[in-house]
Image: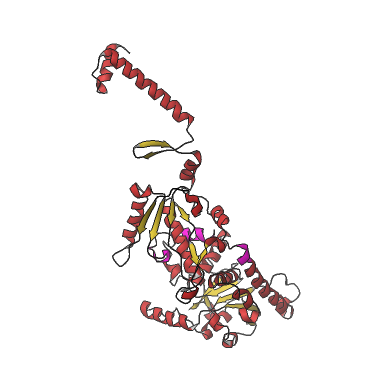
């Protein structure tokens, strides 16, 4: 490079010094660029971020967390999760998906051991990992959502309080914009974003059913609760085997090793009937409530049910002393609820939340499940069972017999039986799952 070209280049960079000075400047710039290239090549496993106009080098582990999954150094905190088991599961999943959108780890929230509107004096928080397996959750949901402990925060924690809007003016669009704004800029610099205000179940919904299903699949009960459910299921099947051995259902050529049973989430208690009648009036839908007689008749008309079957009734405790729920069933259907089954002592040892978790597991494992399509409990069970069927390569139960069939007794189906029910996994949000007539037959 000759002197004239050097000075031309120096003028290009705004350098109007003497030729010798220009040469020195350019030499220094060249050396700097050379070492910069060597430095970045040597640390190619590290990420670079900007903070206060300074470039900082991240450790390899944090870099991998940022690019291969959910960040492990940024967190989302949510209020205590309340209400019934399945409302809490939805609220938890919604919190997880909110954290995913913000690319943050969800700090392990507290669940509620009882229904606060029924047992105010008994309301107390219960840690997530007392109900569901913490490590198993993170393993199954790896790279999708992530759960963290408060001990992960370290000694110095910056927290930003973010209050969710409320009222009619707080639309889905405004809520989504708030989340997008919080995922970048000054707010994202805080180690913890703490969501203040409403229970996550009441937050606006921005995620498709399949995303919720992905989170639900990662929820595995702790061994203590799962073993309690095992005891109930084993008792049902043991009685079923005895029944089959005394009937033609257990004749030569049929196996007694597996005694199938039907589980019915029977919503006929007074407070539910009041609620569903009001819901029918508001929504102008007549297929929400079902009487005991209607449920019994439709279950008895399930095509292919067989001449003899054990029927487990998942009912509210207020109905355990109502013998009428055990009377009037079609011949060959033998109904049991937890008291008649002799397992009510298993339930009484636990809080409302754990009792619901046991009943959920018993219903979920049933060979046939029948529920109400406007019940969150029933809807989430069918969602889980639909996922199992889909994994077998079946996307519709129309016209075929599938394993783990589900039915909605509040909607009439074939031969005046209950309608076949599979969750519509293509729904854009969970509204139909929370409170909706989402039972689909094909």
Nearest the viewer among 79 and 32 is: 79
- The residue nearer to you, when weighing 18 against 270, is 18
Q: Position of residue 28 (x, y in %)?
A: 35, 20
**Residue 131's quadrant in the figure?**
bottom right
Q: Position of residue 247 (x, y in %)?
A: 72, 81
Q: Is residue 327 left or right of residue 38?
A: right
Residue 427 percent location from the top left of the image: 43, 63
User: Magenta stretch: residue 237 in it?
Assistant: no
Displayed quadrant of residue 80: bottom left
* Residue 312 against residue 10 in the figure, above or below: below
Q: Which residues are magenta?
A: 197-226
With respect to residue 52, does 183 lie above or below?
below
Measuring 54% from the left and 62% from the top, which residue is drawn there?
387
Question: In this figure, what is the number of numbered marks?
Answer: 0
Q: Is residue 422 visible?
A: no
Farthest residue in the right direction?
A: 252
């Amino acid at each position: 490079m000759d002197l004239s070209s050097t000075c031309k280049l120096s003028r290009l960079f705004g350098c109007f010094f003497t030729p010798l000075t220009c040469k020195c400047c350019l030499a220094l710039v060249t050396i700097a660029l050379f070492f910069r290239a060597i430095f970045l090549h040597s640390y190619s496993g590290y990420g670079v971020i900007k903070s206060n106009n300074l470039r900082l080098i991240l450790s390899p582990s944090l870099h991998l967390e940022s690019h291969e999954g959910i960040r492990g150094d940024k967190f989302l905190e949510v209020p205590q999760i309340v209400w019934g088991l399945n409302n809490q599961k939805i609220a938890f999943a919604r919190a997880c998906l909110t954290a995913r959108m913000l690319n943050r780890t969800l700090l392990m929230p507290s669940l509620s051991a009882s229904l606060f509107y029924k047992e105010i004096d008994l309301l107390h928080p219960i840690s997530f990992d007392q109900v569901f397996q913490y490590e198993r959750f993170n393993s199954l949901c790896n790279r999708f959502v992530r759960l963290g402990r408060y001990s992960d925060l370290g000694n110095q924690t910056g927290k930003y309080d973010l209050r969710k809007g409320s009222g009619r003016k707080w639309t889905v669009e405004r809520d989504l914009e708030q989340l997008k704004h919080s995922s970048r800029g000054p707010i994202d610099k805080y180690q913890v974003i703490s969501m203040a205000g409403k229970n996550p179940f009441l937050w606006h919904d921005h995620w498709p059913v399949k995303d919720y299903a992905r989170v639900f699949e990662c929820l595995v009960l702790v061994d203590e609760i799962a073993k309690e459910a095992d005891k109930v299921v084993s008792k049902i099947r043991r009685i079923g085997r005895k029944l089959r051995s005394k009937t033609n259902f257990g004749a030569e050529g049929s196996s007694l090793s597996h005694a199938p049973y039907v589980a019915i989430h029977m919503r006929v208690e007074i407070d539910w009937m009041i609620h569903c009648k009001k819901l029918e009036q508001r929504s102008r839908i007549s297929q929400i409530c079902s009487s005991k007689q209607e449920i019994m008749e439709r279950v008895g008309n399930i095509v292919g049910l067989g001449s003899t079957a054990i029927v487990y009734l998942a009912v509210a405790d207020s109905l355990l002393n109502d013998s009428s729920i055990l009377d009037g069933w079609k011949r060959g259907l033998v109904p049991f609820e937890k008291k008649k089954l002799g397992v009510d002592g298993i339930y009484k040892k636990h809080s409302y939340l754990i009792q619901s978790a046991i009943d959920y597991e018993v219903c979920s494992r049933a060979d046939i499940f029948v529920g109400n399509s406007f019940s969150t409990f029933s809807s989430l069970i069918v969602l889980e069972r639909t996922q199992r069927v889909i994994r077998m390569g079946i996307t519709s139960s129309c016209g075929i017999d599938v394993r783990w069939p589900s039915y909605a007794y509040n909607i009439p189906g074939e031969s005046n039986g209950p309608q076949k029910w599979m969750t519509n996994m293509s729904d854009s949000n969970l509204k139909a799952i929370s409170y909706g007539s989402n039972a689909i037959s094909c």
